[in-house]
């Protein structure tokens, strides 16, 4: 693996983890049950973010940047 590729994958993974944490905090503030669901089943946090895009658009921005970074690292 090339060093630049590893850097892109690492940064993308950090951004994706940050977006998940941000969605976890957002969903926990909104409803405790959603917070527990997103903690134990992480893909549910992104479903919650799609349903409540008005309050979760920053986390979705981080997730898209993370996916783009990982994608660039894998190319």
Image (cartoon, rainbow, N blue to C red):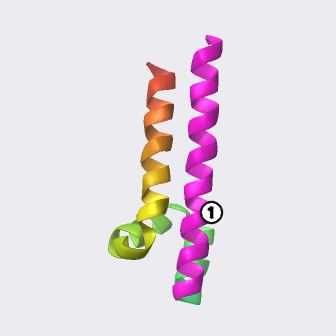
- What residue is shown at x 52% (from left), y 81% (from top)? 34
Residue 40 colored magenta? no
Helix, strand or loop: magenta stretch: helix
Q: Is residue 2 visible?
A: yes
Q: Say if residue 37 shows up in the picture.
A: no
User: Horizontal placement of 23 versus 40: left or right?
Assistant: left
Picture quarter with the N terminus: top right
Task: Estimate the x, y position of residue 69 in percent, counting from the top left.
Answer: 49, 33
- Camera-side residue of 18 and 58: 58
- Quadrant of the rendered structure where residue 68 is? top left
Is 18 magenta? The answer is: yes
**In the rendered image of this protein, does residue 68 appear above or below residue 57?**
above
User: Camera-side residue: 58 or 37?
Assistant: 58
Q: Name the residue at 43% across, 58% down.
A: 60
* x, y percent for residue 62: 50, 51
Q: Residue at x 64, y 33 (%)?
A: 10
Residue 46 at x, y percent in the picture: 44, 63
Work out which quarter of the rendered image holds the C terminus and state it: top left
Identify the residue at horizontal 59%, vertical 88% (top origin). 32
**Which residue range is magenta in the image?**
1-30
Tell me the SS state at disc 1: helix
* Residue under pointer 1: 21
**Label 1 neighbour load within 10 Å: few <14, some 14-19, many 20+:** some
Looking at this rendering, what residue extends furthest in the top direction? 2
């Amino acid at each position: 693996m090339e060093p630049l590729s590893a850097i892109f994958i690492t940064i993308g993974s950090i951004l994706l983890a940050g977006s998940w944490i941000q969605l976890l905090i957002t969903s926990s503030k909104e409803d405790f049950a959603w917070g527990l669901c997103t903690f134990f089943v992480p893909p549910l946090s992104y479903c919650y973010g799609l349903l409540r895009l008005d309050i979760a658009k920053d986390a979705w921005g981080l997730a898209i940047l993370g996916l783009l970074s990982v994608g660039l690292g894998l190319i």
